Image (tube, grey):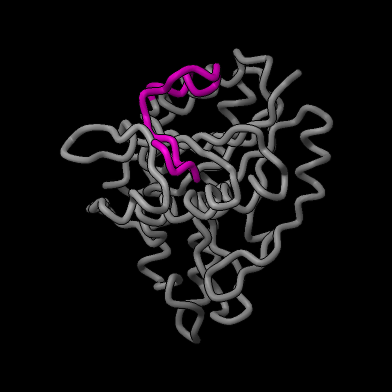
Amino acid sequence: MAELIILKLGGSVITDKSGECRVDKERISSLAKEIASRKNIIPIIIHGAGSCGHPEAKEHHLDKGLDTTNKAGIFITHHAVRRLNDAVVNALRASGVESVGIHPLDACTAKNGRLISFECGPIKLLLKHGIVPVMHGDVVMDEEKGVCIVSGDQLVSYLAVNLHAERIGLATDVPGVLKDGNVIPAINKKTISNLEINESGNTDVTGGMRGKINELLMLAEMGIESNIFHVSRTDDFLDGRDHGGTIVTKKTTL
């Protein structure tokens, strides 16, 4: 029976984060073909914004909330991330995967930067009919701040719980969580306190690796494991093999 999985493609692996919305179409096409070749999975695809959204959000300080000067930033930022989302959807469709973009600005509400609602009904129906939903980090209306940026990682944790995903994988530009240059095979809430997590030097208004791990640790506390691995090992994750990365878990014996 096919597995329901969540695969999150980091913004840094599908764009050049040092540029202005430089979409890596070759990488996206390769990933789309990997996904298309697996018939034993039901994928939910989530991707980061990378250079298509983070610079715009930073320029209009949307991570600080809404004021009288930055309302135009909602359209500008959302337009940028939709451009990247279209590229991912188009690549999947070109590879034979029926898919459609779902935009958090249209479907979500946040409060103080945290998702409090996401209309999951359409996603469930898309999955039922064999259509892959493709979501992304986005600008979202916020009950307290007016507006906020919701990362793809926050979408992962919210949807993993509400859609009961069986496996969760995050494809990144690093091979996992590192210590002294070596991959840590597994982390939990206790062991992470002993690690120093370096942030990306590129523009990121959603917390980078630290934000990612915080989201996954919250999932782990609910008994839901997740996997962080290098994008080149995506095929291993899709097939359920060892991906050489890091498992985020609640288990105390690692």
Depth check, front residue: 35 or 115: 115
The image quadrant where one finds the N terminus is top right
Residue furthest to the left: 180
The answer, for residue 81, to whether it is visible in the render is no
The image quadrant that residue 41 belongs to is top right
The image quadrant that residue 45 belongs to is top right
The spot of residue 134 in percent (x, y) is 63, 39
Depth check, front residue: 211 or 195: 195
253 shown above or below 156: above
Residue drawn 70% across the image and 63% down it: 117
Q: Is residue 239 magenta?
A: yes
Residue drawn 40% across the image and 22% down it: 233
Q: Which residues are magenta?
A: 232-254
The answer, for residue 41, to whether it is visible in the render is yes
The spot of residue 187 in percent (x, y) is 38, 42
Depth check, front residue: 253 or 89: 253
The spot of residue 66 in percent (x, y) is 51, 80
Residue drawn 63% across the image and 60% down it: 105
Q: Is residue 158 magenta?
A: no
Depth check, front residue: 218 or 11: 218
The image quadrant where one finds the C terminus is top left
Horizontal side of 233 relative to 138 (left or right) equals: left
Horizontal side of 70 relative to 42 (left or right) equals: left
The spot of residue 148 in percent (x, y) is 52, 69
105 shown above or below 86: below
Residue drawn 41% across the image and 56% down it: 211
